[in-house]
Amino acid sequence: MKLERATKPGRLANGVGRDRGPVVHLVPNPDGKEIHNLSEALCGTYPKHFWSDWAPDNFKVCPKCQKKADKLNNENSGTTTLPMP
């Protein structure tokens, strides 16, 4: 399963804003869709409108998403594609 790094966007219509999420979520993307069109993250959260692909390396990954990704990776014998920070 391919996972994408994503953040919840800011309050402005284009997704920019100082209130943008400081936590990176891991969102399943098995079909290679554009990140804005994906549904919920591994932890079960989802944005109000769309995901933002702006996910800097220094942002921490959601602990629930990371735990679920590690579990998926172990169950699938390493076939889960984890995104590189």
Image: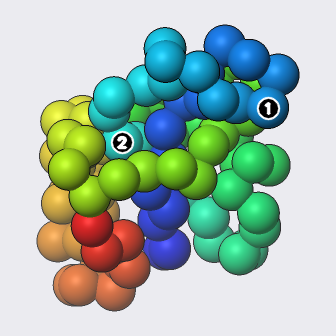
Q: In this view, does 76 lie above or below 50?
A: below
Q: Position of residue 44 (x, y in %)?
A: 47, 28
Colour scheme of the rendered structure? rainbow
**Can the viewer see residue 39?**
yes
Q: Is residue 44 above or below residue 75?
A: above
Q: Residue at x 63, y 71 (%)?
A: 30
- Give amino acid for label 2: Val
* Mark 2, secondary structure of its residue: strand
Tell me which corner region of the image, top left, top right, bottom left or bottom right, holds residue 57: bottom left
Q: Left of 76 or right of it: where is 33?
A: right
- Residue where numbered disc 2 is placed: 24
**Can the viewer see residue 46?**
no
Q: Position of residue 49 (x, y in %)?
A: 77, 24
- Give amino acid for label 1: Asn
Tell me which corner region of the image, top left, top right, bottom left or bottom right, holds residue 22: top left
Q: Left of 54 or right of it: where is 50?
A: right
> Mark 2 or mark 1, which is nearer to you?
1
Mark number, residue 77: none
Q: Is residue 33 above or below residue 60?
A: below
Q: Residue at x 34, y 86 (%)?
A: 79
- Residue where numbered disc 1 is placed: 14
User: Label 2, label 1: how many angstroms apart (C-alpha)?
Assistant: 18 Å
